[in-house]
Image: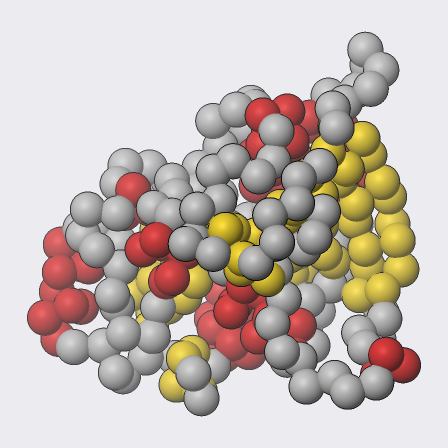
């Protein structure tokens, strides 16, 4: 970050921007770090660390500005994130895992200690897994299933009904793609690292777009340099 007065918190405030008010769902911010060639992980799944440490502090500050931080079950299983706020002052938000079958392991860091954690699942989750997750201290919310997983509008509606007005979605690629495809994202915050890895995990998957003109339109909201990384925020138009 450049300038002595610039802090992770002030950069995060600009990146998050004003929240849009929606009827029945929270404001949704997609946040991820990628290499210059658009990869969020190497071909084997390794992603530590794409972003530099100061950028990770900004990510924690973005978490602190939102009511909930959300990941898919794949991210919870593979990366085992804590999803709390540690690198900057501020309260940790509610942790949410979108997990249609409750495959998140009991020993996952997202299930340990404060803050609270909620898993959003479907009728496909077994009674044994529901009991296992409940014993770990997490809340369970059931919503209808959808092709490939959870009904995302229903999941966001459940969070909104419980007072959640803003969420930060940290991945993985499948969840990011699904939210964009369903037109449920309001802002995208991308950290771009000065590294090229070639074949790897793409940040965004297939959106069914066959012409450039039909792609999701964005408007740049702000841009910051963080050491050699670049952080840019875009509003999703439409």
Q: Quadrant of residue 121?
A: bottom left
Q: Position of residue 105 (x, y in %)?
A: 21, 55
| Position above or below: 197 against 158 | above
| Residue 63 vertical position relative to residue 163 in the rendered view, above or below | above
Quadrant into which the N terminus falls: top right
Residue 93 shows in this picture: yes
Report whether 196 appears left or right of 67: right
Whole-percent x, y for residue 85 in the image? 49, 32
Q: Residue at x 82, y 59 (%)?
A: 235
Q: Position of residue 62 (x, y in %)?
A: 63, 39
Q: Residue at x 57, y 52 (%)?
A: 40
Is residue 122 or residue 196 the one in the foreground?
Answer: 196
Query: Vertical placement of 195 versus 94: above or below?
Result: above
Q: Residue furthest front?
A: 198
Question: Is residue 191 toward the left or the right of residue 96 in the image?
Answer: right
Can residue 142 be seen?
A: no
In the image: residue 103, left or right of residue 43: left
């Amino acid at each position: 970050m450049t300038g002595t007065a610039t802090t992770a918190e002030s950069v995060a405030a600009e990146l998050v921007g004003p929240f849009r008010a929606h009827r029945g769902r929270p404001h949704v911010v997609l946040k991820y770090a990628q290499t210059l060639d658009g990869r969020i992980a190497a071909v084997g799944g390794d992603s530590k660390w794409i972003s530099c440490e100061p950028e990770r502090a900004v990510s924690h500050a973005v978490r602190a500005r939102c009511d909930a931080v959300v990941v898919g079950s794949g991210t919870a299983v593979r990366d085992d994130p804590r999803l709390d706020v540690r690198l900057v002052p501020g309260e940790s938000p509610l942790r949410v895992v979108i997990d249609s079958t409750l495959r998140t392991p009991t020993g996952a860091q997202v299930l340990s200690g404060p803050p609270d954690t909620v898993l959003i699942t479907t009728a496909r989750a077994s009674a044994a897994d529901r009991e296992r997750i409940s014993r770990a201290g997490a809340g369970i919310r059931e919503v209808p299933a959808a092709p490939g997983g959870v009904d995302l509008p229903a999941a966001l509606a459940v969070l909104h009904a419980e007072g959640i007005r803003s969420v930060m979605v940290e991945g993985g690629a499948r969840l990011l793609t699904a939210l964009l495809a369903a037109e449920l994202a309001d802002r995208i915050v991308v950290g771009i690292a000065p590294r090229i890895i070639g074949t790897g995990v793409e940040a965004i998957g297939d959106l069914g777009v066959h012409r450039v003109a039909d792609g999701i339109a964005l408007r740049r909201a702000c841009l910051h340099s963080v050491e050699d990384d670049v952080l840019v925020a875009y509003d999703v138009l439409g």
